[in-house]
Image (cartoon, rainbow, N blue to C red):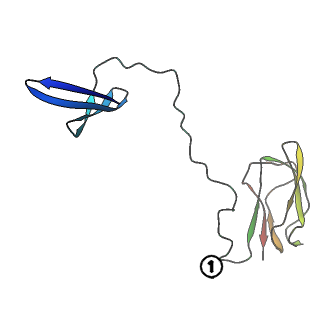
Amino acid sequence: MKKFKFSIQGNNYEVEIQNIEDNIAEVEVNGSVYKVEIHREIKTTKTPVLVRKQVIPSSEADKSKTSSPSERKGAGLIKAPLPGTILEVKVRPGDIVKFGDKLLVMEAMKMENNITADREGKIAAVKVNQGDSVLEGDILIEIGS
């Protein structure tokens, strides 16, 4: 940032101000870094500091496509792709579905979306009813083997 040269009691000092945050400054004096406190009135800024929490994706897209030999086979979760409302449930527990079969109809952003099966299997559980509001990532249906 800024560099200064001081002479105190006959000793020469080269000072570089590296960072100033609130009333604490990091300064480098002849190659050594020091944190020093500045005695002055701290002015508060009107600009807020933006702090965001870490967002974890709700999709299973980041998981690997293959499973290990010891992992449970055939179970799958159908999750809500967007926040919305369930308009119609097309399956019941015990129904057999094939890849691509329509499981339910969901309204999201004023559009109807068909939620389809991503695997073959037997419906283990239906977690939603007609008229339910769901958030992105909520489990809608469990498909077993």
Q: Where in the figure is residue 109, as x and y percent of width and height?
A: 84, 42
Residue 96, x across and y down, in percent: 88, 74
Looking at the picture, does residue 121 appear above or below residue 54? below
Is 65 left or right of 118, judged from the image as shown? left
> Could you tell me which secondary element the residue under label 1 belongs to?
loop
Residue 121 quadrant: bottom right
Left or right relative to 118: residue 57: left
Q: How many marks?
A: 1
Front residue of 27 and 41: 27
Quarter holding residue 98: bottom right
Work out whether residue 129 or residue 58 is closer to the camera in this orientation and state it: 58
In the image, what residue occupies the spot 12% across and 24% down?
8
Name the amino acid, label 1. Ser
Q: Quadrant of residue 74?
A: bottom right
Horizontal and vertical percent position of residue 120: 83, 74
Q: Eyeballing the image, is 129 above or below 121? A: above
Identify the residue at the far left of this view.
10
Quadrant where the C terminus lies? bottom right
Vertical order, 51 against 94 (above or below): above
Q: Position of residue 76 (x, y in %)?
A: 74, 69
Q: Which residue is label 1 attached to?
A: 68
**Left or right of 128, for residue 59:** left
**Residue beneath the point at 21% across and 31% down:** 14
**Residue situated in front as seen by the camera: 50 or 98:** 50
